[in-house]
Image (tube, rainbow, N blue to C red):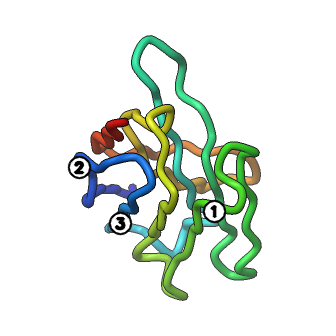
Amino acid sequence: QVQMVESGGGLVQAGGSLRLSCGASGRTKSIIRMGWFRQPPGKEREFVAGIIGDLGITNYADSAKGRFTISSDGAKNTVNLQMNSLRPEDTAVYYCAAGLGLNGYDTWGQGTQVTVTS
């Protein structure tokens, strides 16, 4: 089993920055990929960014490209999301996730609130 715990959310003005962090514990050697998702108010959860730990390959949602950067340590114990140039539409609960299988994500954190004011 793998457990994920996020930190770093908060309130920020538009144009500002936040850094989210997520610590993984348990059978972290089983993790193949790590990522960040978000759920805006009244909307479904959506993908933000992902990283394949061993290869360092990253991918981003179009809304995150050029503004957000995902990173992880080599041991796959942490995954971070640096968010710059934040916009009110970035307001959401942000979740980190880990994928243990060949596809997708199957382990989730509890979420951290990010609120961007205009």
SS for tag 1? strand
Left or right: where does residue 91 sit relative to residue 102?
A: left
List x then y, in percent, for residue 48.
61, 46
Residue receiving disc 3:
21
Instruction: Specify the quadrant of the image occupied by residue 51.
Output: bottom right
Q: Earlier in the sequence, mark 3 or mark 1?
A: 3
Cα distance between the residues tagged 2 and 3: 12 Å
Give the answer, above or below, for where 42 lies relative to 39: above
Quarter holding residue 2:
bottom left
Camera-near label (2 vs 1) is 2
Q: Which residue is mark 1?
A: 33
* Dot 3 amino acid type: Ser
Q: Is residue 106 above or below residue 83?
A: above
Residue in view at x 51 percent, y 57 percent: 85
Seen from the viewer's position, the closer of residues 78 and 32 is 78
Q: Amino acid at mark 1?
A: Arg
Q: Position of residue 17 (x, y in %)?
A: 40, 62
Q: How far across and how far down the image is residue 1, in percent?
A: 39, 55
Asked where in the image residue 70 lies, by quadrant, the reply is: bottom right
Q: Which quadrant is the C terminus positioned in?
A: top left
Residue at 45% across, 69% down: 80
Residue 31 location (% of width, % of height): 56, 66
Circle 2 sits on which residue? 10
